[in-house]
Amino acid sequence: MQAEPRVSPHSLPGIPGRAPRPPAPAGGPIGARFGHQGLRSGHPAPPPEAGGPTREQPIHRLSAYLRRTHGLKLRRLMLDLGTTCPNRDGNSGYGGCAYCDLSGSGTGAMKIGMDLETQYQTELRRVRRSIPDGPCGILYFQSYSSTYPDLEPLAQALEWAASKADVAPILAIGTRPDCFSEAAADLIARHRSRFLETWMEFGLETADDAVQISIGRHDTLENFHRACQTAGERGLKRVAHTLAGLPGEKPGGYRRQAEEVARAGCEGVKCHQLMVLERTKLAKSWREGRVELLEPEAYAAMVAEALLLLPWSTVVHRLTADARPADRADGRTAEWNRIAEKQVLDAIRNFGEASRI
C-alpha cells in the first residue's frame, strides 16, 4: 500500500458553516424528580423501561448500552500499533502535548517488542478473569495516533483484528482529528461490517484553540468537527475525549466542550480530569507550582454540568481518567476517581431536585 501523505494540523480546509444550536430549555420533563444526563439538552430522554434514566443510573453508561444493545459485557483490550504523532516527529512540534507521556497515553507495548498478537493475548488473559466465556473484548488501538504518519500499520492491524471479532466484536481506534483523512476513514469503513460497531475516538481536549497552542497540541476545533463529519458519513461512531482542568482554560471551558460534542453529533464521550504523568512537560510545570489540579468536588461540578447538556443518546464511556500508579507524578489514586465519580452522579441527581425548589 502506498504511504499516505502526512496531514498538517494547520492546513485542513475550513468546514462548512453550521447554524448555532438554539439555547437548551431550563428544567426537565414534567414529573421528573431527579436530574439526569440530557436534562438541559433540549432532547427528551426515553422512559426507564426503554433504557432511559433512573435515579440509580442518571447517566447513559457504556456498560448499560452494551447490555441493552448487544446483550454483552465487554472490556477494552488496549493495543499499540507502534505509530507516532505529529507533535512527536516534528511535523507540528516535538515532545508531545504537555500532558502526554512517552507511551502516547497508551501502553507503549510495541516499543518494547510486543507484537499485536502478544499484546492481545496478554490483555485477553486480564479480561478473562472477569469475563471467562464468550465475547468479552473491545479491540482498542489506543497509543498515539493510529492513522499517522501513514496507514500501513493500521491496514495490517485491521486485517488481523477481523480474525478476533468473535471474541472482541467491537473495534475502537484512537487518533487526533488532524490526522484523520478521508483515506483513513475509507480504509476503516471497508472493515466496518466485520464488527458489531466501529468507534473513532477523537481527542477534543479543549474547544479553545488558544489553549491547544499553549499546551503544545496544535490541533483545532475546526479539525475536530471535520473529523467527526468524515467519520459519521461512513457509519463510524464518534467518541469524543474531553479534558477538564487544563492550564489556561477559561471559566465555562468544559461546558463548551460538551456543547461542541453535541454539535458534532458524537455518539459517545469520555470525561477525563487533568492528570500529571511522569515523563511529561506537565510534570515539570506541576512540580514548579505552576499548575493546579482539580479537586473531586470541582471536577464533579464541571462534568455534571456538561452531561446535563449532552443528549441521553450520547453514551458515557468514562467519567474519569486513570493511569498506573507507577506512571503518576501527582500521587493521586483510584480513590480520587471513586470520590469524583460519586460526586458527579450526586450533582446530576441533585440538579433535578434543586431546579424544582
Image (tube, rainbow, N blue to C red):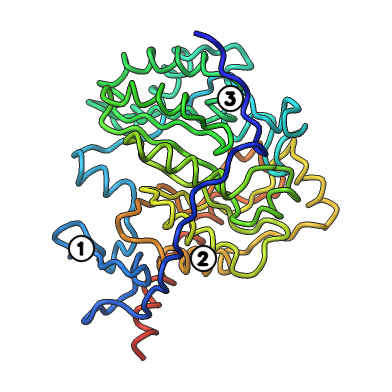
Q: Are marks 1 and 3 in contact (CB under 8 Å)?
A: no
Residue at left offset 63%, top offset 52%: 274
Q: Amino acid at mark 2?
A: Ala
Say which element carries label 2. helix
Where is mark 1, residue-wise? 46
Earlier-in-chain disc, 1 versus 2: 1
Q: Residue furthest right?
A: 288
Q: Check residue 300 in the rendering and tell me which mark sits there, or answer none.
A: 2
- Percent across and percent down for residue 82 are 58, 19
Q: Position of residue 351 (x, y in %)?
A: 40, 77
Badge 1 element: loop
Q: Residues within 10 Å of mark 2 (few under 14, many from 20)?
A: many
**199 or 149: nearer the eye?**
149
Q: Nearer the viewer, residue 18 or 99?
A: 18
Disc 3: which residue: 148
What's the residue type where badge 3 is placed? Tyr
Q: Position of residue 233 (x, y in %)?
A: 35, 38
**Could you tell me how far apart the alpha carbons at marks 3 and 2 are, in whole angstroms?**
34 Å
Residue 10 falls in image quadrant: top right
Image spot of residue 56 (x, y percent):
29, 65
- Please give left or right for residue 136 compared with residue 182 in the image: left
In the rendered structure, which disc, 1 or 3, sits on the residue that comes first in sequence? Answer: 1
Crowdedness of circle 3 by 10 Å Cα count: few (<14), some, many (20+)?
many
Mark 1, mark 3: which one is toward the viewer? 3
115 relative position to 75: left or right: right
Q: Is residue 263 left or right of residue 170?
A: right
- Residue at horizontal 54%, vertical 48%? 321
Residue type, numbered disc 1: Pro
- Foreground: disc 1 or disc 2: 1
Q: Which quadrant, please, contains the C terminus?
A: bottom left
Q: Nearer the viewer, mark 3 or mark 2?
A: 3
